[in-house]
Amino acid sequence: MIFFNFLAAFILASIIAIISFKLKFLTWRGILAQFILAILIFGFGGLKWAVPVVIFFFLSSILTIIRTKKNKSVETYFEKPGQRDQYQVLANGGIGGLLVLLSQFIKPELLYYIYVSSLASVCADTWATEIGTMWKAKTVSILSFNEEGQGTSGGISLNGMIGSFLGAVIISLSSLYWIGLDKLNYLFIIASAGFLGSIADSILGASVQAQFNCSVCGKITEKKIHCLKNASKIKGFYWINNDVVNFVTSLIGGFFFFLFRIILKV
Ligand SMILES: [Zn+2]
């Protein structure tokens, strides 16, 4: 049985790697990291763990393709535009890999709920960016409410909020078959944890994440280097980049599930 699980995992992980390569989503190190993570999650977790992350991958890929066609200019702000690297992959999926390994030994159901919540949070954050920057829209800082450039860490917009909500709900629903209709309250908690996780991501982005000002073009950016020159830091901590914030976001999504379950006593 375990042999067939890993054989299926290998085939599915290969398909995803080929798509990432063809669409130039990831650097080759990024593809390798994604491949290993996918084998772990699909092989140990089976369909139950694979379906939510596969849905996240395919739908987010489609959104990225559409957003790139509609509004590529927003990427000038992003720390790592275009191809994502291994750090971005691990920041988003590392927790999932860790949880599936742990679930082989302890509390598989609880760790599964935490996994889906973590993924809901990652998806909410990803969709907030992709749907939020698909069209030109007014963006304000989540903390000061001052108007900001689109795609800015800590910037929120109505489209982005809708994207975030949809991302959290889709991932929650993707686990419906395994969580079951008798635990609809869990699906509600997972979606809420995911949505709040992406809000936390924006707050971290607006407060502690490093932001730079390019001395050449004058743009505010997540990039340490812009227009081939060192940009000067205007806020946040130098070492807290987008990957660190995304990693914390994926932790927070799982943590919120845990917290809600205790508060609501379910
Ligand atoms: Zn510049």
Image: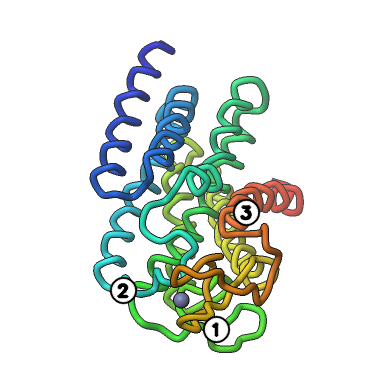
* Label 2–label 1 contact, CB within 8 A: no
Residue at the spot 49% in from the left edge and 59% down from the top edge: 124
Estimate the x, y position of residue 239 in percent, counting from the top left.
67, 57
Answer above or below: position of 124 versus 226. above
Q: Is residue 45 above or below residue 214?
A: above
Nearer to us: label 2 or label 1: 2
Residue identifier under label 2:
71
Which color scheme is applied?
Answer: rainbow
Q: Farthest front residue? A: 229
Q: Is mark 1 within 8 Å of ligand 1?
A: no
Q: Which residue is mark 3?
A: 244
Mark 3 and mark 2: Cα distance apart in space: 26 Å
Neighbourhood count class around disc 2 (C-alpha, 10 Å): few under 14, some 14–19, many 20 upward: some
User: Residue 14: horizontal and vertical position, in percent?
Assistant: 30, 30
Q: Earlier in the sequence, mark 3 or mark 2?
A: 2
Give the Cα distance between marks 1 and 3. 22 Å
In the rendered image, residue 91, in percent from the top left (x then y), is placed at 55, 47
Q: Disc 3 marks which amino acid?
A: Val
Which numbered tag is attached to residue 140? Answer: 1
Q: Looking at the image, which is closer to me, 180 or 22?
A: 22
**Mark 3 falls on what kind of element?**
helix
Instruction: Of the two numbered discs 1 and 3 on the same chain, state the one appearing first in sequence.
Output: 1
Q: The residue under label 2 is which amino acid type?
A: Asn
> Which-is-in-front pick, marks 1 and 3?
3
Mark-to-mark CA distance, 2 and 1: 18 Å
**Residue closest to the eye, 223 or 149:** 223
Position of the N terminus, as image quadrant, is top left
Q: Name which residue lies at 59% across and 40% down.
A: 95
Mark 2 or mark 1: whose residue is earlier in sequence: 2
